Image (cartoon, grey):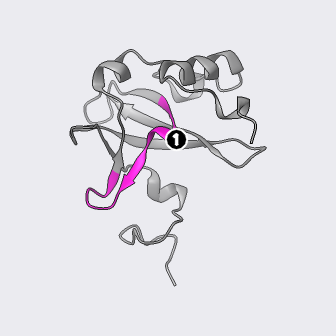
Amino acid sequence: MASLDDTGNTSGRLIAAKQVQGTDVFGSTLDKIGAIEDVMIDKASGRIAYAILSFGGFLGIGDRYFPVPWEKLTYNTDLGGYVTDIGRDVLEGAPSYTDRTAAPWHDDAWGQDVYAHYGMHPFWDIVP
């Protein structure tokens, strides 16, 4: 049986949130564009709403945090990280923040802007 602390085991369909944190994210040309800092989970549905991508800093200084719709990421077992079709230019112009405690998570309009930036409808607007 796999352990929640076994970060080397990437087999299976499920992964603990703490294993996702720190995972590299690669662009479509397989260049590293950042790492996952955290994930945001919708309390009502249990769906992952965003991966919070850290990007732009050096040794954790000057990092910006970018909420990226979870659906924009695909896990690649060969790379041991996530791949996205988001380019650096799109990411650099995306809604972001620098202070983790100051992100406007309660503001639905901000969340809609995040999804719109990536050309997606917010998951909470999609009827199953």
Task: Say which residue appears at 38% left-offset and 49% top-offset.
Answer: 22
In the image, the segment drawn in magenta is 67-81
Q: Is residue 13 magenta?
A: no
Identify the image quadrant of the C terminus: top right
Q: How many marks?
A: 1
Instruction: Tell me where residue 39 appears, x and y as whole percent.
Output: 54, 43
Q: Which residue is mark 1?
A: 70
Task: Say which residue appears at 51% left-offset and 41% top-offset.
Answer: 71
Disc 1, SS: helix
Q: Residue furthest front?
A: 128
Q: Residues within 10 Å of mark 1 (few under 14, many from 20)?
A: some
Q: Quadrant of residue 112?
A: top right
In terms of depth relative to the viewer, which is nearer, 33 or 103? 33
Q: Residue furthest bottom?
A: 1
In terms of depth relative to the viewer, which is nearer, 66 or 77? 77
Q: With 121 as the anchor, is 106 left or right in this view?
A: right
Q: Is residue 79 magenta?
A: yes
Instruction: Tell me where residue 37 appears, x and y as whole percent.
Output: 44, 41
Please, is residue 89 above or below residue 23 in the view?
Answer: above
Q: Quadrant of residue 98?
A: top left
Which residue type does callout 1 highlight?
Answer: Trp
Please, is residue 5 above or below residue 81 in the view?
Answer: below
Task: Say which residue appears at 35% left-offset and 34% top-offset.
Answer: 85
Q: With 114 as the anchor, is 76 left or right in this view?
A: left
Instruction: Tell me where residue 45 appears, x and y as whole percent.
Output: 75, 46
Task: Say which residue appears at 44% left-offset and 28% top-offset.
Answer: 65
